[in-house]
Amino acid sequence: MTPSDSNWLEVLRAACAAPNSSQRKVAERLGYSTSVISQVLGGKYPGDIKAVQAKVEGVFMGATVDCPVVGELPRNRCLEYQRQAFAATNHLRVQLSRTCPECQHNRHQAARSEDR
């Protein structure tokens, strides 16, 4: 783990330790369960740690991506769009379903690039 990789963990720890905050409140903001946040902070999360990192960077660090469909948006919102189911009745979801799979910001596309 490089120093820049650990920075988001420090931000996550600080968010949980902030006055009037808790792991539960942080988990709700990120869209994860309290147990996921606890496991991440303890270094024992078996899931997609890059997705958690992207959400922390989007919600607490102001990281954005330039989406070819909707323009600039928080990184965590990009992940949320990627996880939404196709809906033919929703114009935005139709556009996203066509564009997201090949987008450089797609979480699966990034994993494919690392494998090469």
Image (tube, rainbow, N blue to C red):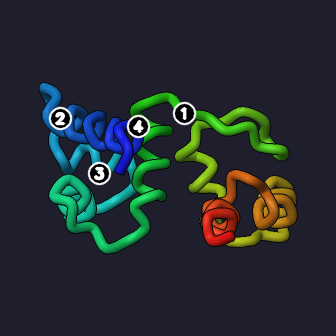
Asked if residue 37 is positioned above or below residue 29 in the image, the reply reads below
Tell which tag, 3 or 4, sits nearer the viewer. 4
Q: In the figure, 12 relative to 96: above or below? A: above
Tell me the crowding category of disc 2: few under 14, some 14 to 19, or many 20 or more residues within 10 angstroms, Cα based.
few
Q: In what element is the residue under mark 3?
A: helix
Name the quadrant containing residue 83.
Answer: bottom right
Q: Residue at x 14, y 29 (%)?
A: 20
Which of 8/3 is in front?
3
In this orientation, which residue lies closer to the viewer: 87 or 102?
102
Tell me residue 59's x, y (percent).
44, 37
Give the residue pinned by disc 3: 27
Residue occupying image coordinates x 20% and y 39%:
13
Give the mark toward the camera: 4 or 2. 4
| Image position, residue 111 (x, y; %) | 61, 66
According to the image, label 2 marks what residue? Answer: 21
In the picture, measured across the screen, residue 27 lies left or right of residue 4, that is left
Q: Which residue is mark 1?
A: 63
Q: Is residue 68 left or right of residue 36?
A: right
